[in-house]
Image (tube, rainbow, N blue to C red):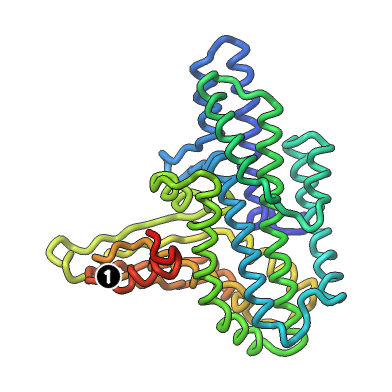
Amino acid sequence: MNFSEYHSHKWSKNLAEVKQNADEAATLFAKGQTDEAKKKINYIYAGNFDDPNKVFPGLKVMSIFWKAEEEMMQCRFDYMAKSAAHLQIAGNPDFERNLKEVWAKYTSDIAALTKKHNLLPDKMASEAINMYPPQLGKDWAMIFQALVKESEAAVAAGKMDSALLDRWMDFCLRGILAYNFGLARQAVLAGMIINKTSEKELLNIVADSKDDYAWELSKKFFVDVFPAAGLTEMNDLQTIGRYGMFADQDLITKETMPAPDKAKTEPKIKTSEFLNCQEFSMFDFVFKHLKVKAEKIGIAMCPYCEEHGKKNASLFVPPSMKPVVQLLTSMGYNNKSCIFETKLHPADDMERFMQAQEKVFGGQF
């Protein structure tokens, strides 16, 4: 592998599990064990969240997660490039050459893992992997909703045909490619900014763009992507928000409650520890490829992640609590894992809540 399999390619482990369970479901159905087959198909489609140490997000959650991540990385690159426009790097011949070199290495990994796990027929895999630039396309929502409808019928019948499974795999693979292409573009741009100017210049560009980026991203998620997919019920949104990241990441979540006699004065504390990070892996590879001299690659990406977390908290934490979100440690800042902490203080924070709703939904909530 050119990239760390643990950090960059957990997607392959999840899709291999889909393939294995689908094959087992077909065998069970052929033996007349329809109820057991139904359970297997429901597992690969809807996921399983019972064991917090082995969350399997399922095709529905993983696919929409990767679509959302495609939008995230497009949005982040656009804002970074806008703030760096005076340097005239994004889109110039050197940028495009560097990007294609990195992308050839990444797609080599994708091709090898897709073949190793027999995820798709060769022709379908080749068409997805060789698409440049990779994207899910304008009709993604129609495709997604058709896959959902057909899969729910498959669960009810206890049988998912190979053509339906191939379409799911194709959708997921294209989403993974589009997501990571967006990461590659950011990493190449960030590395070239440092090589042309300095780390300080990159810090200024990130600081200048992170706030607008994070609000725009919330709009894309909750006004555009999820409603287009037909996902408007709070239960669906909560499931995606809580379990979508397991599509690519291993993480541990903890919650610490204040003592009963201090519940009205002290905060509830939630922590999420991420054990792997595809952003770290991509930026690490690109910075080495471009021979970027940077003490901490996290300056190019971690502030964006932290700001996204802050905006989500502002948007969804009820007004009876005041959220304080902080990135405590990060692989990008030379730590072993990324730890996000959210302190939920008991307080009247209606102003924050209303401002966030207005910012994202424009008063239509």
Q: Visible in this render: residue 52?
A: no
- Residue at position x 45%, y 66% in the image: 360
* Residue 51 visible in image: yes
Q: In the structure shown, which secondary structural element does the residue marked by tag 1 occupy? A: helix
Where is 179 relative to 56, above or below?
below
Q: Where is residue 100, by image quadrant?
A: bottom right
Instruction: For label 1, count other residues whose C-alpha is less than 10 Å away and answer few (under 14), some (14-19) or many (20+).
Output: some
Left or right of 279, for residue 215: left
Count of numbered badges drawn on the protein: 1
Q: Position of residue 324 (x, y in %)?
A: 35, 72
Q: Residue at x 24, y 65 (%)?
A: 320
Q: Dot 1 corresponds to which residue?
A: 350
Residue at x 55%, y 53% (from the top left corner)? 225
Say left or right for 33 vs 355. right
Q: Position of residue 148 (x, y in %)?
A: 56, 35
Quarter of the N terminus within the rendering: bottom right
Q: Is residue 213 above or below residue 86?
A: above
Q: Please, what is the three-letter code of the amino acid marked with disc 1?
A: Met
User: Which quadrant, please, contains the C terminus?
Assistant: bottom left
In this view, the residue farthest toward the left is 261
Give the percent coordinates (x, y) of residue 124.
80, 38
Answer left or right for 182 relative to 59. right
User: Foreground residue, 249 or 187?
Assistant: 187
In terms of image quadrants, where is residue 252?
A: bottom left
> Looking at the picture, does residue 311 appear above or below residue 85?
above
Q: Quadrant of residue 180?
A: bottom right
Residue 104 coordinates in the image, percent (x, y): 83, 58
Q: Residue furthest top?
A: 32
Which residue is depicted at the point 58% across and 38% down? 145
